[in-house]
Amino acid sequence: MIKAISRPLTQLKAEYTVVVIGSGYGAGVAASRMARAGQSVCVLERGRELLPGQYPNDLSSATGQMQADTSRGRIGSPYGMFNVHVNPDMMAFVGCGLGGTSLINANVALEMDERLFTYTPRQWPKEFRDDPDVLKSHVDRARGMLDAKAYPIKFPKLGKLDALESSAKLMKQPFYRPPICVNFEAQVNPFGVPQVACTLCGDCCSGCNDGAKNTTLMNYLPDASNHGAEIFCQARVSHVAREGKLWRVFFMGPSADPSESTSQDVPMSVMAAIVILGAGSLGSTEILLRSRDQGLPLSTQLGQRFSGNGDVLGFGYNNHWPT
């Protein structure tokens, strides 16, 4: 049985060496590496800790896990697992919970195409442009931690996979099974978390209730916890400020009797020598913008030049793959 790793906020210390904000891929990696380096680490996650078996599995339970950020304010619980950002020119769908968006994405572990260093050279540090292979060891390490592998040949055939292969052949394009962060054999993983083999339930993007999907809750976060990191949930960071040689992280936490209502949240803070913003592109930028509003000197380019990541949702009807 998978055990909870978060702590109540009543156990929060006044100061840590490192405070990591968020718990998805970036934050999970940072927490794991800082804890392994022997640092005093605190992780602050805005959502709740939900374990496999607790994720919504029908429309009724999913409705209670929805929240939307709009120009008129938030709709729904600030702790809802499914967070939609509704904007005039761009929309985004992100995860809210211990594990971040890794809880609700497809966990496809594709490497970045090296041609991007040539197409958009200004966007990348000179070290990467001069030697793209400098990232390879880090990619390999991340793939190992996430246990990314291709869908096994021995597993049942998938109609969607067959259709994509057929399309690739017709278009004379290469086809391969991409690495995905899913567990395909029953095991206790290297971080002490028991996992079952994938059951092909199809709930990757609504929360894997079997525990086969390798979200950061299965690897980086328990690894950080195993090495002494202290993880806290329902801590919604507002901004950061410099205080002498340290940083103060301001956030809202639930009262002793947590409820869905934000009116019962109470202001809290924690000090750190190092603050790592891993709250995603939107979350981290929002925190920095609020910090700038509070007087932290930051670039005027903050929050500029955003774009979507090119995801497209397609729906089909009566398109059963012929056997």
Image (cartoon, grey):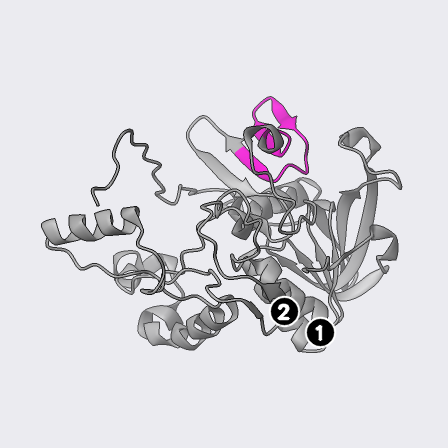
**Left or right position of 265 against 149:** right
Q: In which quarter of the image is residue 309?
A: top left
Residue span colored magenta: 63-84
Is residue 112 visible in the rendered image? The answer is yes
Residue plotted at (33% across, 69% down): 129
Name the residue at 72% across, 77% down. 38
Discs 1, 2 touching: Cβ within 8 Å = yes
| SS assignment at label 1 | loop
Q: Nearer the viewer, residue 276 or 65?
A: 65
Q: Does the magenta stretch include residue 216?
A: no
Q: Nearer the viewer, residue 116 or 190?
A: 190
Q: Which quadrant holds the N terminus?
A: bottom right
Residue 169's image quarter?
Answer: bottom left
Task: State left or right for residue 116 relative to residue 247.
Answer: left
Residue 190 at what x, y percent from top left? 59, 74
Q: Residue pushed farthest top?
A: 72
Residue 76 image position (x, y, % from top left): 65, 27
Q: What element carries label 2?
A: helix
Asked if residue 290 lies left or right of residue 133, the reply is: right
What residue sits right under mark 2 in the picture? 32
Residue 113 falls in image quadrant: bottom left
Expressed as whole percent of the image width and height from the top left, the position of residue 144 reads 48, 72
Query: Against 313, is 163 above or below?
Result: below
Image position of 302 with respect to 144: above or below: above
Residue lying furthest front: 323
Q: Earlier in the sequence, mark 1 or mark 2?
A: 2
Query: Could you tell me which quadrant the C terminus lies in?
Result: top left
Residue 227, numbered circle: 1
The three-letter code of the residue at mark 1 reads His
Q: How many labels does the image show?
A: 2
Q: How crowded is mark 2: few (under 14 residues within 10 Å), some or many (20 or more)?
A: many
On the question of residue 171 being in view, the answer is: no
